[in-house]
Amino acid sequence: MKLFNLRLTTLKSKLYAIVFASFVVRVVAFFVLPTTPSALGPDEGTYSALAKWTEQGLPASDFPIYGEGLYQSARSLVWPSAMFIKLGIDPLQSIRLTATSYGLLSVWIVVFAFLKSLDFRAGLAEYVSRKSLLVTIFFAVFAFLPSHFIWSLLGLRESAIEFWTLCAFISLYWIFHFHKKLSFKLSTLMIASIVFAFSSRAQVGWVIVFAILIFLVINIRERIALSLIPLVLVGFLLGFTSTTGTTSTTSTTSTTGTTSTTGTTGTTSTTGTTGLISSTGGKIFGSLTSAAQLTAYKHQVNKLDAASAITTPSCPRDGLAYINRPPSSFDIYFCIAWRAPYMAATFLFRPLIVIDTTSTSSLFAAIENIAWLGAIIFIVVMLIKKRRMAFIGPLAPSLIFSMLYCVGAGSYEGNMGTAFRHKSLILWVVLLLLTSVMAAEKRPKSRNESA
């Protein structure tokens, strides 16, 4: 009797074999990784300490060096890890177990959503039937591209933010293009995805919300778009408030305080609601107005002690160097926009071999980046040649997201290593673009062009 009789004769079996292979390799890697924070991701030591701090129920504001800010923007990684610690698992192993679980879930959810889509899109199903090998290769790349795979093994936030980003856009895809109406499960998934995206990396949460809202406003004539906008705003408000309010690592401290205050004061609920709305609105407006200053500050901080610091080009309104005064908000926004093309290109196209190689890890990153460069160049060439893309409607939200993300990340990143790691978040978009340009039919020349 054979224990396993796995026949990879269908696309479905091949894709789920990739998911299973990812699971097996992750299990092996979990036990092979060193018991100390990896040199490739030393931050996992900080996250494991935060998970232990959370498990002990200590105030987040007292966490050494980082305070509650890191806790608020890493809860989707820290909370599950704290539960693993309660089960007796080592803090570092707990944070890695959470990260690799998110990575496995990301591989599974893209396979699941893709196979479901084949039942609804005849054009996609017809193309996939002819290019099943190519599709299988793309999924294998998503699952096992070295850097993308390694980041999801280490106790970092990369796999968590990728999973919740995928959930947000998959739920949008299903609601907008297939169901054409809100359902409880998909609505809950979309709201939860946005909330947990903010609790994985708040900057990406903002980009997700802006990208979806831009797409919905463009398609405002669609009835479902009008229904989705309030849903996205609810997710945004919940996600934003969860990362800006005063928090504790214990779930009872803030709740108890709020409850007792409500019970003992004679303030009306209307006044409380108005105050809450006003306070939240003020925080949102303050975050928007201070975004430029925070981006410029983080860019400089990320360059400190970095062997591969990103060179910042000069700007006509650099403030102090320009007219001997500190830069104003307008100056900072102007300089971010001025540098955006260069910084976004740096984020997308580098590191490069030789000029950006400062260590063994940066050399491996530069070698892998050749594949990224090849993919992007191929996409551009095919777009010029065919002058169209297949499945542009379903791809539009992810395209908007990737463009906003590249501009934002380019302005934010301060060193090549972190930038390359964060670039892995748009791997799925690059693979979708490759599929789109390859599946597109060449646009016929007009009479004027052929004349």
Image (spheres, rainbow, N blue to C red):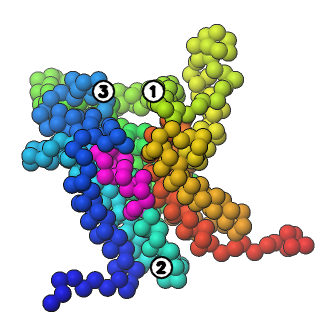
Seen as rendered, the residue at the extreme top is 324
* Disc 1 to disc 2, C-alpha distance: 47 Å
| Mark positioned earlier in the residue sequence (2 or 3) | 3
**Residue 396: quarter of image:** bottom right
**Label 3 SS:** loop
Residue for badge 1: 305
Is 394 placed left or right of 181 in the picture? right
Q: Magenta residues?
A: 142-160
Amino acid bearing label 2: Ser
Seen as rendered, the residue at the extreme bottom is 1
Is 243 placed left or right of 363 in the picture? left
Q: Which of labels 3 and 1 is toward the front?
A: 1
Residue for badge 3: 66
Q: Is residue 338 above or below residue 400?
A: above
* Disc 3 to disc 1, C-alpha distance: 18 Å
Amino acid bearing label 3: Tyr
Number of other residues with Cα within 10 Å of mark 3, as a class: few under 14, some 14 to 19, many 20 or more: few
Q: Name the foreground residue: 87 vs 1.
A: 1
Q: Name the foreground residue: 76 vs 274.
A: 76
Number of other residues with Cα within 10 Å of mark 2, as a class: few under 14, some 14 to 19, many 20 or more: some
**Label 2 SS:** helix
Q: Can residue 48 be seen in the rendering of this structure?
A: yes
Circle number at residue 132 = 2
Cβ–Cβ under 8 Å for marks 3 and 1: no
Amino acid bearing label 1: Asp
Cβ–Cβ under 8 Å for marks 1 and 2: no
- Tell me, yes or no, whether the highlighted magenta stretch contains residue 395: no
* Disc 2 to disc 3, C-alpha distance: 48 Å
Q: Position of residue 206 (x, y in %)?
A: 44, 41
